[in-house]
Amino acid sequence: MERLLRFETLIAICALLISAITGAAVVYQTHIIQSEYAATIWPYLSVDTFVTNQRRVDIKMTNDGLGPALIRSAQLVIDGKRARSWEDLESIVRRDARGRVAFGSSSINASTTIRPGESHQLISANLAPDVSPDILARHRVVLTFCYCSLNDSCWSLHSVPGVVGGEFPHQVSSCRIDEGIATKLY
């Protein structure tokens, strides 16, 4: 009888062990499936500067990822001071170029969504023939964006237009919804 009791205890312990291993496998598999799903909707933003015919400079943000990028905040810093709008940058460059530059810009804020493969024109500057594109590099311009995916995974991108490298988004726990960079202050 005692031997039968030991045998039943051994079977019960084995059953519990197998159940625990199965439970752990299910939890791990669920984690893998969640990670795979997150990868299918992962946005990846980059900021690029284009100089065309030495007369036009464009700064664009592109979503090279697989899912939409939901912008939560955007900041523009010029020479270490936070700017409220693109007009702050425009007035500095116009002053340096003695007015021989025409600007175009678009707002970017918490209502902006950039689809996969889509580019968003941030700013364009048309320069007079005697104005060098280097005029835009006289001041340190830094763009910082915080954006999220559809499953609320979030990233921050810190970019210095015209400088190649070092512009990789890094994951953050969340984004604070903040004012964006407007085309005009009202």
Image: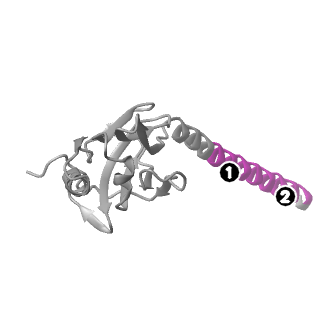
4 inside magenta stretch: yes
Q: Earlier in the sequence, mark 2 or mark 1?
A: 2
Q: Which residue is mark 1?
A: 24
Image quadrant holding the N terminus, namely: bottom right
Tag 1: residue type? Ala
Q: Which residue is mark 2?
A: 5
Total marks in image: 2
Q: Which circle marks residue 83 in the picture?
A: none
Tag 2: residue type? Leu
Which residue is nearer to you in this view: 1 or 94?
94
In the displayed structure image, the side of residue 2 where residue 25 appears, left or right: left
Determine if residue 150 is in view.
Answer: no
How would you rate the neighbour count of disc 2 (Cα within 10 Å): few for under 14, some for 14-19, many for 20 or more? few
Which region shows up in magenta? Answer: 3-29
What is the residue that sits farthest to the top in this orientation? 117
Q: Residue at x 19, y 52 (%)?
A: 87
Q: How is the image coloured?
A: one colour
Which residue is nearer to you in this view: 68 or 25?
68
Determine if residue 92 is in view.
Answer: yes
Q: Residue at x 20, y 58 (%)?
A: 84
Query: Separation of disc 2 and disc 1 at Cα?
Result: 29 Å
Q: Residue at x 70, y 53 (%)?
A: 20
Q: Residue at x 14, y 48 (%)?
A: 184
In the displayed structure image, the side of residue 85 where residue 36 appears, left or right: right
Q: Position of residue 44 (x, y in %)?
A: 48, 43
Q: Position of residue 73 (x, y in %)?
A: 30, 53
What is the residue that sits farthest to the front in this orientation? 130
How would you rate the neighbour count of disc 1 (Cα within 10 Å): few for under 14, some for 14-19, many for 20 or more? few
Q: Quadrant of residue 158?
A: bottom left
Q: Is residue 149 above or below residue 146?
A: above
Magenta segment's dominant SS is helix
